[in-house]
Image (cartoon, grey):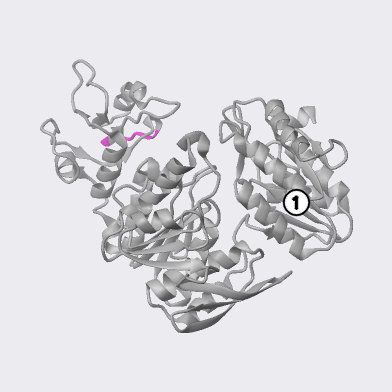
Amino acid sequence: MSNSLLQLFAEVESLSSVPDVKVTGIVLDSREVEPGNLFIALLGGQVDGHIYIDDAIDRGAAAIVGTENPPEGMQNYIQVADARVALAGLSAAFYDHPSRNLSLVGITGTDGKTTTANMIFRILQESGIQSGMITTVNAQIGEEALDTGFHVTTPEAPDVHRYLALMESQGLTHAVLETTSHGLAQERVGAVEFDYSVVTNITHEHLDYHGTYEDYRAAKGRLFTVLADDGVAILNRDDQSYEYLAEVSGGRQISYGRHPDADLRAENIRHSPIGLRFTAIGAGLNMEVECQLLGEFNVSNGLAALATTVFGMGLSPDLALAGIASLETVPGRMEVIDMGQRFTAIVDFAHTPNALENAVKTARLLTDKRVITVFGSAGLRDREKRRLMTESSVQLADLTVLTAEDPRTESLDEILSEMASGAQNQGGIEGENFWRVTDRGEAISFALDQAKEGDVVLVLGKGHEQSMCFEEIEYPWDDRTALEASLSAALELEGPEMPYLPTQASA
């Protein structure tokens, strides 16, 4: 694929200094530059892409886009006011605006995005609609699943538009795109034209990046401000974000929740160890929902999916219900690991105070015995979560095991110390109802050693993720593999080896 840079910019920004050269691709990592590529120098929080311009040129970049003044004597350098806006617009133009030809659902929220996206995707499939999906887990294009990386949330703009273009080229008509607050604030979904904007909830998260809850909420709200007049906003009537999003949203609005004024509401909720059931009522419909997923929060996720597809798209209620019922699991979301042990072991992505609270409450529905949690808190991220999550665990669970979770360049001991303070704030006693175990594999094994018949062990925070970051190195890691390794060793069964982490030597 090759495009004229002059023509691409004509669709994005009016500049007089754009050279008429052909570009074969758009990249923002100089190490990925191939001959003929356009290199976008982004000014990030930790890395300034301008320092890699020479490397990009050496690798054959046809042109450079940046925000700084052009280096002396450099040819084919285009200076822009905002490189991320330019990156999004140029990416959309390069792939010929694929989102215009897809019926596109954007989903944002603190928790529940991936599950809701999977529910909507299943409903579309059950309805016979050719569709794709991009989530934190993978990109699903028809029957093909593409890995989007170790710690990817919303992919960067060139990848988003490339995936959408691939969907369009394969004859798909609908797509579901999970959108994070970082992805929205950083224009990773810039120039994407959404037909449906969905919110799950907006609770405490990412204040290290956004600063305040209001700024965090505003970042997610961008998904709703870009809706066209004929777009549809799907809002959570129970969430604290409702009034704000209802005010800023364009297009038609549909609300869901337990609130009596919700357009689609849930009643008669029943939980069991094999899933949940509830009645969804609204607009003259009375739908009996069966879901194989565990947890009270999946009532809200299910309502969001039904509001989008049945109320928003006008799809068959029966097919929508069949789609939700067919979803057996979402990777790393309340995923049960059963190797014949006499207690329940679950891996979940819960890495926020709200998600941890919901996970423990769900575990309480599964047992009248004890609930044991294992989790950490990421380095270089929202520090207040460390205290809040630990306080919630000590309040709601019986035993809490604190451990590593992507400490990055921060001191793991200091992170665990902050978390331990949260436990002590709620009367936690170290060595009695909470522990610090530095190595995550050892922490999982320790928790399993404490478990008795009928207990529930929750391994939280990593979910589907495939790596753990220490310093600046990503070590292969999967909580599900680690849990299987520990269980197989305890049960004297064949199983995987415990993945290596640098903390093992000091464990």
Residue 220, position in %: x, y?
42, 49
Query: Which residue is denoted by mark 1 in the rendering?
Result: 396
Does the magenta stretch mainly form a helix, a strand or a loop? loop
Vertical order, 333 against 76 (above or below): below
The residue lying toward the viewer, choosing from 286 and 461, is: 286
Quarter of the image where one finds residue 410: top right
What amino acid is found at the position of numbered circle 1 in the picture? Leu
Q: Is residue 34 magenta?
A: yes
Vertical order, 204 against 123 (above or below): above
Q: Is residue 456 magenta?
A: no
Quadrant location, the C terminus: top right
Asked whether, in this view, residue 382 is left or right of residue 357, the answer is left
As helix, strand or loop, the secondary structure at mark 1 comes to helix
Asked whether, in this view, residue 49 is left or right of residue 485, the answer is left
Vertical order, 378 against 153 (above or below): above
Vertical order, 353 against 208 (above or below): below
The residue lying toward the viewer, choosing from 133 and 178, is: 178
Residue 263, position in %: x, y?
45, 72
Total of numbered circles in the picture? Answer: 1
Could you tell me which residue is drawn at 39 percent across and 33 percent down? 29
Q: Report the span colored magenta.
A: 32-37
Residue 352, position in %: x, y?
61, 46
Quarter of the image where one finds residue 258: bottom right
Residue 45, position in %: x, y?
43, 28
Asked whether, in this view, residue 148 is left or right of residue 103, the answer is right
The residue lying toward the viewer, choosing from 453 and 384, is: 384
